[in-house]
Every structure is written in C-alpha cells, then in structure tokens.
Image (cartoon, helix red, strand yellow):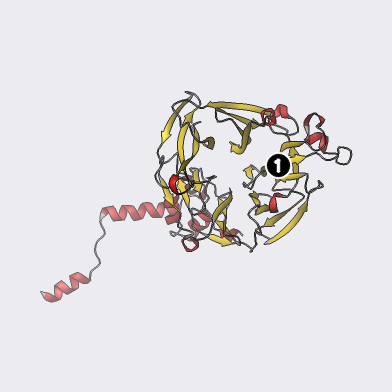
Amino acid sequence: MNEFMMVENKMPRKKSRKEFHKKTVFKGILWLPKEIIGQIFEKLPDKSLMRFRCVSKSWDSMISDPNFTKNNQKLLLLSSRSAIQIMDYEGYEGKTGMIDFFDSEKRKSVKVLGSSNGLLCISVGNSSLFLWNLLTGEKKTLRSYRIETGHDSFGFGYDYSTDDYKLVRFANLRMSSFLVYSMRNNFWKSSQITIPDDALQLSSCKAGVLVKNSLYWYATYVARDFQTYEDSCVICPNNKLRGTQSILIFSFDVVDETHKMFLPPPCVDSTESEGELMDFKGYLCEVHNHKNNFIDLWILKGDADTKKNWMKLMRITRYDTLPKIGVMEPIYFARNGEVLIVFRQGKQKNKEHGSSIRMTNKLYSYNPTEMSFRRVKLQGKKFWSTEIAYSGRLFSINRQL
C-alpha cells in the first residue's frame, strides 16, 4: 500500500482543462503574424507591455523597437526645484505620483529641460545631465557640463533624419553664439548668429518650446543701425528708431540646425501684457495674458514671415467665480478640447517675522464650447514651477543611442 502511494505521488499531475486551454491559446498567439501582434500591442497598457517583453526575444525586440509607436495617453509633469510629479489628467483626473529617480540627489536642484520622442532631458544641480525614459525607467548620463551662472536656457528635441537627440544651450541668455549637443556623437559644437551680442538676448531662462521639429524662444531685440544690419527692417516693425526694443520669436530647426526670427501676433506689441509659447496640436501657440482679465490664444498657420498667418484660436475670460489673485496660465490641451489652466498664487507667511511668500497653485479645466470652468482637485504637492507634456515610448535608450 505504501509503495503504491509513493508511485502515485511521483506521477505527474494531470493538467486541468482550463490550464490546457490557456497553454494552447498562448502558443497560438506566439504564432500570429507580427502585424496582428503589433495591432494587439497598440491597445494594451504600458504595464502589460513591459511584462510581455519577458515572454520571448521576438516580443522584446518588437516592443523595444524605436519604430514601434503606440497611441499613449499623454502625461503632464509638474516640476519644482525639489520634486517632479506625474499627472495623468485624461486617464485618472487629479491623481499624481511622485518620481523617486532623484532620491540620491535630493539636495540638488532638479529641472526638466524638455521632452521629445519619448525621452526627458533633466539637469540635476549645475553639472549633471540625464536622458530618461519614464516608462522603462532607463537613464543615460550625458557628457558633463558646467553652468557658471543661473542664466542659461536650454532646448531639447529629436532629429528624425539621423535618429539623434539634440540639446541647445544659450549661456547667460546671449544669442550671438550658442551650443548644440548631439547625443549620438556625444559632443558640443558652437553655432553663430551674425547680430551684435548686446542687440539680441533671450527674454528669460525658460526652456525652448518644441513644436514638431523646431524649438522656440521669446527674444528681445534692440535696433542699432538699420544700414549695418540688413535683418533689422524685417525684425523691427514700422522701421522703429535706433535704440528701441522689439519682441520677437527665435526658432531653431533641430533637423537642419538653421535658425530664424519672426514677429509674434499683433497683440504682443502691447507692453501691458505677457506672453507664453506652447504646442497646440502641432502648431506654435502664443498665449497672451491681458492684465489677468482674459487670455488670447493665437496659433501660427503657414509661413512665419508675416503676422497675417497668426490666427486667434480662442479667448478665455476670467470670471468672478475664479480666484481673484494669481496669474492665469493655460498649461495643457486635452484631446476632448478642454484646456487645463493653472492659477499661480502667492500667500504671505509669518508677517510678524518677515515677508516670506509661500506659493500655491490651483488647477481648473476650461470647456471652450460651454465657456465654463470646473475645479480640478490635485493630490500631491500644491506648488510647482514648470509643466511638461510627456508622451512615452517603450524603447531602450542604451540600444538606440
């Protein structure tokens, strides 16, 4: 009897009908054509795709291929000097997650320099640059550099013609010369602009805005001598006198590495309002804030050499039900047409011991069709300084670069 029991225990367990069915279906999936498997992958969430990379070498190669594109949900990164939050506004409204990538560098300032083709470019402190794939968790340290002052501006973009990522750097906001870094070649090279150093400068240290293949910045131009500089008549409208200041937009093409300057929408001539540049569905968008009473959104269609190609997209009016204090600024265009707006507010703290200010942000969603606002409650930190739209891609940095 005991011998029979020992033999019976050694016998393989008969698989259930359910287990047999699962194995048969799985083998069938492996033998499907790559085109059909690719269509199935496009509909799966990113977490599932990450797990499926371990199934077979062919699946890992297919998912990690830089040419594999997926209609990913856009993420919104809310960045401050000490932390970065991830917000999936369209997927799980208001819910955020903290990035722990920089736990070892908590005492250093973290800044998102840009996002392009699934990668983020991030600086930590004054000497560390990283490429980071948020979905896979892979990072790559770039060639070291040093920021001598806090007045540098960067722009990050992808060159599809050479499958390369490029980083543009303006030192001390000067535009007579700037540096372009190639990730694939791993070196910096200098580029020149034939305009006097004191005649053209970036308006701020904000990162360049990427729209398709070009980076855009606001620049300030001071006319010196129309006879000496041929481009002055184009840049300065109405033949302004020497010494007067003009606002223009500077663009840098990441692919052919050419640059040009052109005039913003007509309303930017006003000195009573401020402007921001954004990407609106592949068009350069200029956001103009008129004394915080209302916002005009302009998009550039066609050639940038004339103001006639600027078209007003919409006007967002500040209602009495909205916060009365704080700068109103659009930060995100959702696929359903809604516009996510942030109100940046400052509150006095410890008035008896000083006038330190504690900054807070409030989020609202604007429906252009109904012209209505609704509050978006945010879980996590209430203050951040920079917003970056991010669309992820499941490819390996180390394999591509």
Question: What residue is rendered at 70% in x and 32% in y?
Answer: 302
- Tell me the crowding category of disc 1: few under 14, some 14 to 19, or many 20 or more residues within 10 angstroms, Cα based: many
Figure quadrant of the N terminus: bottom left
Task: State the SS at label 1.
Answer: strand
Label count reads 1
Q: In the image, is 174 to the left or to the right of 352?
A: right
Residue 83 in percent (x, y) is at 48, 53
Residue 111 in percent (x, y) is at 56, 53
Callout 1 amino acid: Ala
Q: Nearer the viewer, residue 231 or 152?
A: 152
Residue 275: name its quadrant.
Answer: top right
Residue 387's place in the image compared with 82, above or below, is above
Which residue is under mark 1?
A: 219
Q: In the image, is 298 to the left or to the right of 337?
A: right
Does residue 314 appear anywhere in the picture? yes
Residue 273 in percent (x, y) is at 62, 32
Residue 65 in percent (x, y) is at 55, 54
Figure quadrant of the C terminus: bottom right
Q: Nearer the viewer, residue 163 or 289?
A: 289
Does residue 44 appear anywhere in the picture? no
Q: In the image, is 151 to the left or to the right of 21?
A: right
Q: Nearer the viewer, residue 258 or 108?
A: 108
Question: What residue is rendered at 54% in x and 36% in y?
Answer: 329
